Image (tube, rainbow, N blue to C red):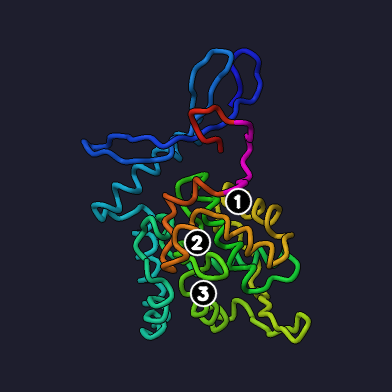
Amino acid sequence: MKSHITEQKMPIYRELDTFTFRKEKYTIYWHYSIDEDLGEKYTTLELDELNVAQVHNQYREKYRIPFPEVNKLVAKAEQIIAENNKNPWDLLFVDQIFENQAPSKFNGYRRPDLERISNMISFFDSKVKGLYKTKLNKLLFYADFMAYSRTGFAISGISYRAIQFGPVPSQYQKMYIKLCDDAKLTVEQVEVGNGNYGELITSKDHFNDALFTKSEIDVLQSVCDTYGKMLTTELVEASHLEKGWLDNQAAKSYINFQEAAFEMLDRPYPSEHSSPDTASQV
């Protein structure tokens, strides 16, 4: 957003605020800009959508109201089962991978989607040299939480736990086994020096950009640009500074998107400036 007078880009800020929706109060991170020439606060359509999404997501979760994407996914699942007579044990395994399937604050209000996850991995594999499992876990984490901080929704629907080596998909081993079984990727044991081995991930998918919005693809690219060039050890150390890991690592618990995403450190954003004393800047 630009100033009405100088046409200069205005910074974007955020602050905790309480909004009333249907006679109930919900706490969100309200994002806005300040036109310093006029001394007024403004929001863009993009920021309005982010602010409103936080309220609507909490309301839908509280009253178990289906999210718009759910009906589409149910219809798609029914079609796959009908056409392919899908093995019920296969469906049970997917249930074990994704412990939080209904959209909630623990999966970024996004129902888990293996096809999207596979394509995210394909994108990272095409951009990042040496995509080892530990590094991939962190890239997925940053992509989902960065997306949530911009739109109020994650990309993959994965739930993340805070463990010793940083945030990881809650059932990442099962997830990778499933993707290998579906011929979406391979995992290879590779010697990395000093007798140590790493698990190298190679995607067998071609990235399908039709599955993602432009905003989501921008996030994937931002994650590659910001974190993809880091060594795995550096990325692990960086993730240990994040609020989502610090608040949950002792109990190895799920990371709450609404509480952690807006507190991410050094989040790339189109308008990055210094913040006023009364608010946190994006």
Label 2: state its secondary structure. loop
| Mark linked to residue 156 | 2
Circle 2: residue type: Ser
Residue 142 location in percent, x, y? 57, 57
Circle 1: residue type: Val
Residue 192 location in percent, x, y? 76, 80
72 versus 197 height, above or below:
above
State the CA–CA distance, disc 1 to disc 3.
Answer: 21 Å
The residue wearing badge 3 is: 172
Q: Is residue 13 left or right of residue 204?
A: left
What's drawn in magenta, residue-wise? 265-274
9 versus 224 height, above or below:
above
Prevailing SS of the magenta stretch: loop
- Between label 1 and label 3, give the one nearer the viewer: 3
Which residue lies most toward the right here?
A: 193
Residue 193 location in percent, x, y? 78, 81
For the point 52% across and 68% down, which residue is it? 168
Q: Which of 249 and 215 is in front in this view?
A: 249
130 versus 57 height, above or below:
below
Q: Which sits earlier in the primary sequence, circle 1 or circle 3? A: 3
